[in-house]
Image: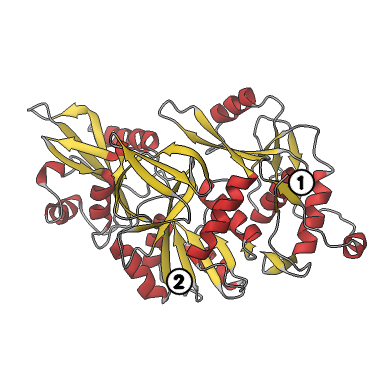
């Protein structure tokens, strides 16, 4: 039976995490995971919602060594939890929140818990091997109906994805990098790029999940170099507009939404670092990377190949266990390279002219003074000629709707100018910085209703 080690750290004294700046060794981590595994309920499915990244990772490891399955839905709304309970009736919730109100049986995982330190120190250091065929996690995305769509992930698939990708990121050079993430460990991107990347490439992670610029800077400062900031475009835009003094970072990694070349270059210039953008999906995991400031082309993970059949793009090979359809418009430019032209559901046609929301949003967010912004399709509204209209919601303190419209007029075809352009304080982004279309549409409709005269 083929196995892959739970940790790539070969020394019991190797640092695997930092909690409040305090290092945690591989030996301590394994002792914590073994302790927790022995005390979990006799159920196979675990909803791990621990916000502390260390608690989350110990929970994941405890599940792996006891052959339990981690459930990682995209949200924790009552509706999603009810659907999850129907999907896995034996599921319980592992939480580090004493006030957790999720409607499942709960196991509270306190920040500090007893363990036998002398016994752990005396025990021989042995890293468990996890069978490659073992079901490690079930991750979920929300489909158009809002019903979570499950995707099963074996340990072999997850581990090979990280092992193939770490060299592309430059994080398998023998140095111990510390990963600081602004994204939760439960989300596929945060799961792979902060938790699994640390476990399987000899690196360490910060337990914190900072959000505001001052908190991000403080979390970065707490850990030693070399440092890697794992974040999203929305966090990067906020950081660029802040005046917070930022400690040196050796690498910035971004995903979850398209990143413009202008933003990538601004980040590299301000922080004197390199920025790498990751491309992937819940279905495939991470499959490609690019240095956005220098190129539009994506480079695939080793062994992964793309093909286009009847206009539909597919990924296969490498860590991808079967031919998997992609949701994006892809142009293959080489054996290992491709260009991304947006999501198939992202294309928009107005008065016979085509564009994509990704392009329109990139032009909007490139306007100086725009902190955040997004276009939306007003499906229930057409002009006098029966042509669908676009709207936009924008966070741009100090700018008027008229000034923004004039700036957009210089950048996009007039048929795509938003009507209305709504100025708001913030957009309804989720914890990973994504802006689900359903949330955006509902938000925009409420803003338009409040703007209408009584």
Residue that extends furthest to the top in the rendered view of this protein: 86
Q: Which residue is mark 1?
A: 65
Residue 321 at what x, y percent from top left?
A: 53, 41
Residue 275 at what x, y percent from top left?
A: 41, 67
Closer mark to the observer between disc 2 and disc 1:
1
* Residue 144 in sight from this viewpoint: yes
What is the count of numbered marks?
2
Residue 32 lies in quadrant: bottom right
Residue 354, placed above or below residue 51: above
* Residue 209 in sight from this viewpoint: no
**Does residue 408 appear to the left or right of 42 in the view shown?**
left
**Does residue 140 appear to the left or right of 357 in the view shown?**
right
Residue 124 at what x, y percent from top left?
A: 88, 62
Q: Which residue is mark 2?
A: 244
Which residue is at the front of the view, 23 or 136? 136
Q: Quadrant of the N terminus?
A: top right
Q: Answer few, some or many: residues within 10 Å of disc 1's Cα (few below 14, many 20 plus, some between 14 and 19).
A: some
Instruction: Pick whichever of labels 2 and 1 is earlier in the sequence.
Output: 1
Residue 47 at what x, y percent from top left?
A: 66, 37
Secondary structure of residue under mark 1: helix
Colour scheme in use = secondary structure
Which residue is at the front of the view, 48 or 131? 131
Residue 151 lies in quadrant: top right
Q: Quadrant of the C terminus?
A: top left
Q: Answer few, some or many: residues within 10 Å of disc 2's Cα (few below 14, many 20 plus, some between 14 and 19).
A: some
Which residue is depicted at the point 10% across and 46% down? 414
């Amino acid at each position: 039976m083929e196995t892959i080690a739970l940790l790539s750290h070969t020394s019991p004294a190797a640092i695997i995490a930092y909690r409040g700046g305090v290092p945690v060794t591989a030996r301590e981590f394994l002792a914590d995971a073994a302790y927790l595994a022995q005390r979990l309920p006799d159920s196979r499915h675990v909803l791990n919602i621990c916000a502390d990244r260390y608690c989350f990772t110990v929970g994941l490891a405890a599940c792996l060594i006891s052959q339990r399955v981690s459930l990682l839905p995209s949200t924790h709304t009552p509706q999603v939890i009810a659907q999850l309970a129907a999907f896995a009736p034996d599921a319980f919730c592992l939480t580090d929140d004493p006030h957790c109100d999720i409607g499942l049986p709960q196991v509270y995982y306190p920040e500090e818990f007893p363990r036998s330190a002398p016994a752990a120190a005396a025990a021989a250091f042995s890293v468990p091997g996890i069978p490659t065929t073992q079901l490690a996690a079930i991750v979920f995305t929300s489909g158009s109906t809002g019903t979570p769509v499950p995707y099963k992930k074996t340990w072999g698939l997850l581990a090979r994805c990280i092992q193939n990708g770490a060299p592309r990121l430059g994080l398998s050079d023998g140095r111990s990098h510390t990963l600081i993430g602004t994204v939760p460990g439960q989300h596929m991107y945060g799961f792979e790029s902060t938790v699994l990347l640390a476990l399987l490439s000899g690196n360490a992670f910060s337990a914190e999940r900072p959000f505001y610029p001052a908190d991000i800077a403080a979390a970065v400062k707490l850990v030693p170099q070399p440092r890697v900031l794992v974040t999203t475009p929305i966090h990067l835009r906020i950081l660029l507009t802040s005046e917070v003094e930022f400690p040196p970072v050796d690498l910035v990694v971004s995903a979850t939404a398209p990143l413009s070349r202008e933003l990538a270059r601004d980040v590299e210039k301000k922080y004197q670092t390199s920025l790498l953008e990751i491309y992937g999906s819940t279905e495939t995991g991470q499959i490609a990377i690019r240095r956005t400031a220098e190129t539009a082309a994506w480079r695939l993970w080793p062994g992964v190949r793309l093909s286009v059949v009847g206009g539909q793009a597919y990924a296969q090979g490498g860590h991808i266990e079967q031919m998997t359809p992609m949701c994006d418009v892809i142009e293959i430019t080489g054996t290992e390279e491709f260009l991304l032209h947006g999501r198939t559901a992202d294309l928009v046609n107005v008065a016979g002219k085509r564009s994509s929301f990704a392009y329109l949003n990139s032009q909007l967010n490139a306007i100086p003074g725009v902190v955040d912004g997004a276009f939306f399709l007003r499906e229930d509204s057409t002009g006098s000629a029966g042509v669908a209209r676009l709207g936009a919601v924008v966070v741009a303190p100090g700018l008027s709707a008229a000034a923004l419209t004039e700036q957009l007029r210089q950048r996009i075809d007039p048929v795509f100018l938003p009507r209305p352009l709504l100025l708001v304080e913030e957009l309804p982004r989720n914890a990973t910085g994504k802006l689900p279309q359903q949330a955006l549409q509902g938000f925009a409709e409420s803003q338009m209703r409040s703007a209408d005269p009584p």
